[in-house]
């Protein structure tokens, strides 16, 4: 069983990562639970004690209760992107967590390298994607290809992604 501790409601980055990952691995046969982000520490710990999960997946340190040292009984995996360590108020807690987590799901190679340098073990890259909307979309025939990348700070994504892009006539 996997228990997910999101940083906030099912919108934005939390929706794209935590909620969608929980939904997808449920479809693959895992038992999953996404706890309400407003639960107190006591309520979170009560649920975890009763559920006895195999892993607790936290959406980085954005939520003040998403700190691995608060849950020493369970293996914790951080799911994070570069904002988790570029934002000044999160940099310290995230760096400290790297030595405590069982693993990290990193949104890119750039993030994975930062996590490894900060002491994380078992870092895997899982690029953020978004489900296609069921609504009607206009035809894209004849439109040039578009690559959209969002980065909180560093331009280093260029060194990672640009060599992988190819342009064909």
Image (cartoon, helix red, strand yellow):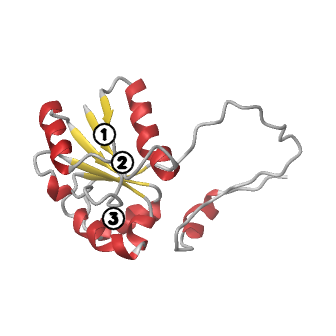
Q: Is residue 67 left or right of residue 153?
A: left
Image x and y of residue 94, in percent? 30, 66
* Dot 1: element: loop
Image x and y of residue 19, in percent? 43, 40
Residue indicated by mark 1: 35
Figure quadrant of residue 39: top left
Figure quadrant of residue 53: top left
Q: Residues within 10 Å of mark 1 (few under 14, many from 20)?
A: some
Q: Locate the N terminus by quadrant.
A: top left
Q: CA distance from mark 1 to mark 2?
A: 7 Å
Q: Is residue 72 left or right of residue 150?
A: left
Residue indicated by mark 2: 6
Using the image, determine if residue 122 lies above or below residue 152: above
Q: Residue furthest right?
A: 142
Residue visible at 20% across and 56% down in the picture:
68
Using the image, determine if residue 136 lies above or below residue 62: above
Disc 1, disc 2: CB below 8 Å?
yes
Using the image, determine if residue 52 lies above or below residue 40: above
Disc 3, disc 1: CB below 8 Å?
no
3 vs 1, front mark? 1
Residue visible at 43% across and 73% down in the picture:
86
* Dot 3: element: helix
Figure quadrant of residue 4: top left
Q: Residues within 10 Å of mark 2 (few under 14, many from 20)?
A: many
Q: Residues within 10 Å of mark 3 (few under 14, many from 20)?
A: many
**Numbered badge on residue 62:** none
Residue indicated by mark 3: 115
Residue visible at 34% across and 47% down in the picture:
37
124 vs 30, nearest the viewer: 30
């Amino acid at each position: 069983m996997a228990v997910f501790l999101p940083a906030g409601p099912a919108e934005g980055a939390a929706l794209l990562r935590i909620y969608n990952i929980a939904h997808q691995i449920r479809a693959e046969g895992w038992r999953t639970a996404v706890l309400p982000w407003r639960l107190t520490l006591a309520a979170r710990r009560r649920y975890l004690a009763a559920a006895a999960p195999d892993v607790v997946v936290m959406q980085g340190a954005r939520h003040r209760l998403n700190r691995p040292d608060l849950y020493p009984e369970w293996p914790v995996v951080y799911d994070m992107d570069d904002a988790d360590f570029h934002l000044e108020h999160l940099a310290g807690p995230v760096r400290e967590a790297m030595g405590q987590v069982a693993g990290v799901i990193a949104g890119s190679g750039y993030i994975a390298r930062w996590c490894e340098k900060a002491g994380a073990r078992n870092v895997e890259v899982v690029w953020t994607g978004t489900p296609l909307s069921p609504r009607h979309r206009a035809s894209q025939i004849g439109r040039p290809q578009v690559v959209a990348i969002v980065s909180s700070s560093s331009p280093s994504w260029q060194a990672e992604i640009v060599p992988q892009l190819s342009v064909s006539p």
